[in-house]
Image (spheres, rainbow, N blue to C red):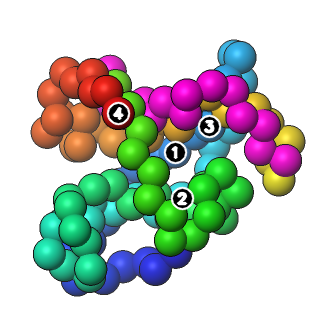
């Protein structure tokens, strides 16, 4: 986790892990990291959280399919993963961010 920096736009968001009807809120900072700043090779979403680090090691890049529905982005993990540190299953990461969801519009990507 690197925190704020040049070219990292903080987004007011709430982040959850969801699976099998459960939903666990994460303490998470969300940034839109703009290409060309702070070593970003592409514009991407930074989710900075110790809980996210349990899923993906720091410094790792992960390209996940995303679906925008209403005010949320749903990042699909490709199956159910058990997060031992949270004692919770996870099928997707949900980022509630009305500003970003509106900017992206209706979207269903494939990774």
Could you tell me which residue is drawn at 33 percent across and 62 percent down?
31
- For this orientation, the residue located farthest to the top is 21
- Tags 1 and 2 touching, CB below 8 Å: yes
| Magenta: main secondary structure | strand
* Mark 2: few/some/many CA within 10 Å (<14, 14-19, 20+): some
Indicate which disc residue 111 carries. Answer: 4
Residue at image mark 3: 17
Q: Are marks 4 and 2 in contact (CB under 8 Å)?
A: no
**48 magenta-colored:** no
Residue 4: give x, y in percent of width and height: 36, 79
Please tell me which residue lies in front, 23 or 46.
Answer: 46
Q: Which residue in the protein does label 1 denote?
A: 15
Q: Which residue is mark 2?
A: 28
Mark found first going from the N terminus, 2 or 3: 3
User: Closer to the camera, 78 or 15?
Assistant: 78
| Residue mark closest to the camera, 3 vs 4 | 4
Whole-number angstrom distance, CA of label 3 to CA of label 1? 7 Å
Alpha carbon distance from label 1 to label 4: 21 Å
The reply to whether dot 3 and dot 4 touch (C-beta < 8 Å) is no
Q: Are marks 1 and 4 in contact (CB under 8 Å)?
A: no
Q: Secondary structure at mark 1?
A: strand
- Where, quadrant-wise, is the C terminus in this rendering? top left
Distance from Cα at disc 2 to Cα at disc 3: 11 Å
In the rendering, at what x and y percent does residue 58 appear?
Answer: 57, 70
* 101 sits to left or right of 56: left
Which is more N-terminal, label 4 or label 3?
3
Residue at screen point 63% across, 25% down: 79
Is residue 51 visible in the rendered image? The answer is no
């Amino acid at each position: 986790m690197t925190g704020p920096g040049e070219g990292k736009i903080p987004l007011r968001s709430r982040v959850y892990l969801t699976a099998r009807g459960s939903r666990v809120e994460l303490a998470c900072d969300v940034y839109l990291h703009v290409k060309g700043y702070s070593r970003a090779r592409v514009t991407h979403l930074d989710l900075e959280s110790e809980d996210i680090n349990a899923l993906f090691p720091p410094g790792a890049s992960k390209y996940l399919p995303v679906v925008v529905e209403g005010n949320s982005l749903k990042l699909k993990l490709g199956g159910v993963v058990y997060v031992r540190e949270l004692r919770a299953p996870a099928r997707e990461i949900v980022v509630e961010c009305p500003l970003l969801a509106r900017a992206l519009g209706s979207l269903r990507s494939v990774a």
